[in-house]
Amino acid sequence: MKQATNLKINAIQHIGIPVTDIANSQAFYERLGFANVMQAGFGAEDARGTCVMMKRDSMILELYQLPESELAEIKARGNGHIDHVAFDVSDIDETYAIIKQAGFGIIESEPVLLQFWTRGCKYFNITGPDGERLEFNQVL
């Protein structure tokens, strides 16, 4: 097994999520408390995509929509292009109640306990507009 490098990594800088409808995805993440802090186009003049950086506290999600000519593959896939993004929370039960009351589709019927870390962790997931799973996780 190779040894880890001495590279210093502070935190996740952002997580990129390809989306099929940038406005719909931006509205979804705004409901979770994220704000648009940067928006820009990218690509060739005749095939421009859109990138929106959504920020909440120190977390940044990069939502990007490819030009229409390149969206077929994403739309055909039928699920998100990442397995999940995990958000650290201080009170999983309170978070679950808030998310449930806000009307998000929660995958689990209640927070799930895993025997990870020293004292375990509890988590639950919701699904984003393009099938990405968003996990809320509290290390106990």
Image (cartoon, rainbow, N blue to C red):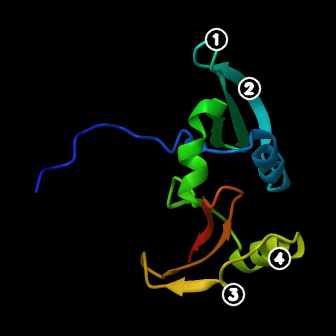
Q: Is residue 71 left or right of residue 128?
A: left
Spatial CA distance of label 1 from label 4 is 43 Å
Q: Residues within 10 Å of mark 2 (few under 14, many from 20)?
A: few
Circle 4 is placed at which residue position? 100
**Image spot of residue 30 (x, y percent):** 83, 48
Spatial CA distance of label 1 from label 2 is 17 Å
**Image spot of residue 38 (x, y percent):** 73, 27
Query: What residue is drawn where x is 12% and y is 51%?
Result: 2
Circle 3 is placed at which residue position? 110
Dot 2: element:
strand
- Position of the C terminus, as image quadrant, is bottom right
Q: Is residue 36 left or right of residue 47?
A: right
Specify which label sits upstream in the sequence, 4 or 2. Answer: 2
Q: Are marks 1 and 4 in contact (CB under 8 Å)?
A: no
When the figure is inspected, residue 127 is found, relative to residue 81, above or below; the finding is: below
Amino acid type of the residue that numbered disc 1 sits on in the rendered structure: Glu
Circle 2 is placed at which residue position? 39
Specify which label sits upstream in the sequence, 2 or 3. Answer: 2
Q: Quadrant of residue 102?
A: bottom right
Query: What residue is drawn where x is 57% and y is 61%?
Result: 79
Specify which label sits upstream in the sequence, 1 or 4. Answer: 1
Q: Quadrant of residue 65?
A: top right
Residue 132, which numbered label?
A: none
Circle 1 is placed at which residue position? 45
